[in-house]
Image: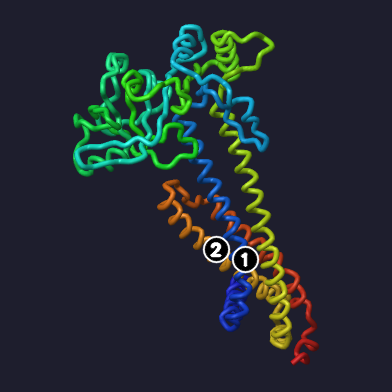
Amino acid sequence: MIYLRLIKESFAFAFEALRTNKLRTFLSLLGITIGILTIISILTAVDALKRNVRASIDKLGSNTMIIEKWPMLFQDDYPWWKFINRKPVDEKDYNALMPRVKTVDAAAFYTVTGGKTIKYKSNTAEGAYMLGVTYDMDKVYTLEIEQGRYFTQNEAQSGKALAILGHEIANGVFKNESPIGKEIKIGNFKATVIGVLKKEGTSILNFTEDDNCVYIPLNFAKNMINPKDERNDPRIMLKGKTDIPESEVEAELKSVMRSIRRLNPQQEDDFAVNKVTVLANQIDGLFAVMNMAGLVIGGFSILVGGFGIANIMFVSVKERTHIIGIQKSLGAKNFFILLQFLVESIALCLIGGLIGMAIVFGLSAVATSLLGIDFSVNIGNVLTGVGISLGIGTLAGFIPAFTASRLDPVEAIRSK
């Protein structure tokens, strides 16, 4: 009970000191608030982007690969001059590849063409992405259909004029009407809507821009575009068998593609087999650098704030030296004096940290609304902010508090 009373009285003294010296308290909080704000903001942003990348990978599957002209690399010295003259992947490659690979469960050939205009009556959606896909697209890429259905195999092969709309496109051209069974215009061509996709949201690794896209059978898309034209971004997407290592799937795909392209052993590959997991790992490395940068930048702010709090605590000890002397002469223990100033320092840091985290919560809500990516602050980052605040408060306040607790009561009283 005595220790609880001492702690209670220490808190009372500390908060009275903070309330009395408002300007000093504000200046002390500033450095800690900025430091916690910086660190938790960057940690939250990186966590949000990681979740976004992982969601994209889950949608594709961990053993999914894409064969295309350009490799996906994050390098300062990207050797684009080696790849620019490569022949784009085409449907002929896809048809020759499929009967010869044994490590793949499913594959699809598709093209992505941007800048399309979608019309329904007087409503228009500009800048849509049109995807011409072979029938197996839904087997290698998760298409979550909210209304309607996917193409049948016969519809895909015959090139029927059908379309599956992304969520934003459907909302833009149909407003409050049901799109299913309605006829839209894609450029100068008409197509019947048979499905609408669920809202996807913004994605870093969104290979198909689902919310702003229109899926149509490849054989229907050939009326509007040339699938061999690299401007239409032709690709083969493949899903490897789950019981076969990714490296084995990749090796077989490279071997068969080299055979299809008739490359001799001395020639380099004239195509790229891009693994989604490798791309994700490269992005994870980028996130790790961002995390470190946030910790360093925020660490400097917190360090400056910590020195500021330590300096102000020494000033506080100096101002209250005679009060410390009176307290000790009335029987106050060293522990009580130490705790009194230590609580004041920790309280300063905690208040600064909580203000910083409150600002982060506000900024994350705004970013989520504007960017369409979930920037919610997780409990781990909140605990990190509280832990840093407690640690800095303890370190910054211990020496001034220890100095105060060791003062001679007689000399302290005379200091007035």
Q: What residue is at 30 percent from the left and 41 percent from the top?
A: 125
The amino acid beneath tag 1 is Ile
Image location of residue 248, percent across then percent down: 59, 15
Q: Earlier in the sequence, mark 1 or mark 2?
A: 1
Image location of residue 239, percent across then percent down: 48, 20
Residue 138 seen in the current view: no
Q: Is residue 261 above or below residue 29?
A: above
Labels in figure, total: 2
Q: In which quadrant of the rendered image does the C terminus lie?
A: bottom right
The amino acid beneath tag 2 is Gly
Q: Quadrant of residue 108?
A: top left
Q: Which residue is mark 2?
A: 356
Q: CA distance from mark 1 to mark 2?
A: 8 Å
The secondary structure type at the circle numbered 2 is helix
Q: Is residue 277 above or below residue 124?
A: above
Residue 263 appears left or right of 60: right
Q: Foreground residue, 52 or 108?
A: 108
Q: Which residue is mark 1?
A: 32
Q: What residue is at 67 percent from the left and 35 percent from the top?
A: 77
Q: Are marks 1 and 2 in contact (CB under 8 Å)?
A: yes
Specify the color scheme. Answer: rainbow
